[in-house]
Image: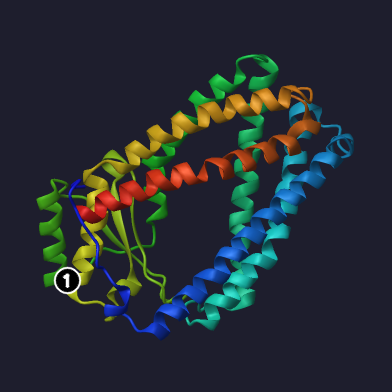
Amino acid sequence: MPGDLHLSGLDPHRYWSDALLHRSARYDGLLRWDWVAATLAGIAALVVLVRLGPRLAAAWELGRVGTGVMVGAVATLVVWAVSLPFGLVALWWGRRYGLEKQSYVEWLLSQWPALLGQVVGLTIVLTVLMLLAGRFPRWWWLYAGVIFTCVAVVLSLVLPYFLTIGTRKPHHTKLAAQLRALERKEGIGGTPIRIETVSDRTTEVNSEAVGIGPSSRVVLWDTILDGRFTPGEIRVIAAHEFGHVARRHIWKGLGWYALIEIPGFFVLAWLTARRGGMARPEVVPFALLVIVVFHLAVTPFTNAVSRRYEGEADWR
């Protein structure tokens, strides 16, 4: 962005009423505290599980890796259960402000696929980490960093094809033609635009750029097209996402992932070594605690990177 860009004098009161600004701040305020409480509760649950680690590991006789995976699955279920009340509070708050449409029962039922995905994902991760730690006690963290960086690249390439199943192409309208013109102007002509139906669950609006290389695509929520926004506003939203694709922000994000995760695995190896090593199943809850605290600690940095890329997409 230009170094001499001056934004002084921008007053939100010129665009929105005091009542609306106060209502918005109140809505965000509770969600922030809800996130803080959920994060602290999750960490507290892991601290308790760390103390129970040896007893949990003794409950199964499935071999070193199998037992570690079971301990990890129990930890995942406990942390998930602890987080549920805070998710319900966020849902209640969103329903109160007219943003969420899901009932509490529908929301609870929708959590099961995510939980299953977490358990399966953690099973794979723990299996790889414990096998590497057993085979390469000193250098497993480096191999893990390289392996999971490669996995992240493959998932970034493949997952968009599956995640956009059920979405649709934009209808052939004047606006759709204008969006295609914006694509060509950004030098990314042919990037698919998909419309995701979310209006049955929420009134919120969102959009995202996903994928790398041939899987790059822009996804717009159908709530953007419900008549609340002018064609010009919709073009700005789409152009922002085209900016992410044109500036290869997902590729750059993968680079930052490697620069953060590989040292993260080193920290994990260094700390778990003081409790017997990552290869021991009773150390799994402590390893999960280290991972959570590490990612929490680097969040300000990752947010700074993320906001920088969002600003760049805005400016383009």
Residue 192 can be seen in this image: no
Q: Residue furthest front?
A: 9
Indicate the colouring scheme.
rainbow
Residue for point 19% across, 53% down: 5
Q: Foreground: 261 or 216?
A: 261
On the image, numbered disc 1 is attached to which residue?
Answer: 232
Residue 54's x, y, as percent? 87, 35
As displayed, is residue 99 above or below residue 302? below
The answer to whether residue 315 is seen in the rendering is yes
Residue at screen point 32% across, 52% down: 310
> Whole-percent x and y of residue 234?
22, 69
Numbered label tally: 1
SS class of the residue under badge 1?
Answer: helix
What is the crowding at mark 1: few (fewer than 14 residues within 10 Å), some, or many (at least 20)? few
Name the image quarter holding residue 60. top right
- Residue at the (25%, 47%) spot, across then down: 245
Q: Quadrant of residue 110?
A: bottom right
Judged left or right of residue 104, residue 314 is left
Q: Residue at x 69, y 40 (%)?
A: 289
x, y percentage for residue 57? Answer: 84, 35
State which quadrant residue 267 falls in: top right
Image location of residue 103, percent across then percent down: 59, 79
Q: Toward the viewer: 114 or 202?
A: 202
Query: What type is the residue that disc 1 sits on?
Result: Gly
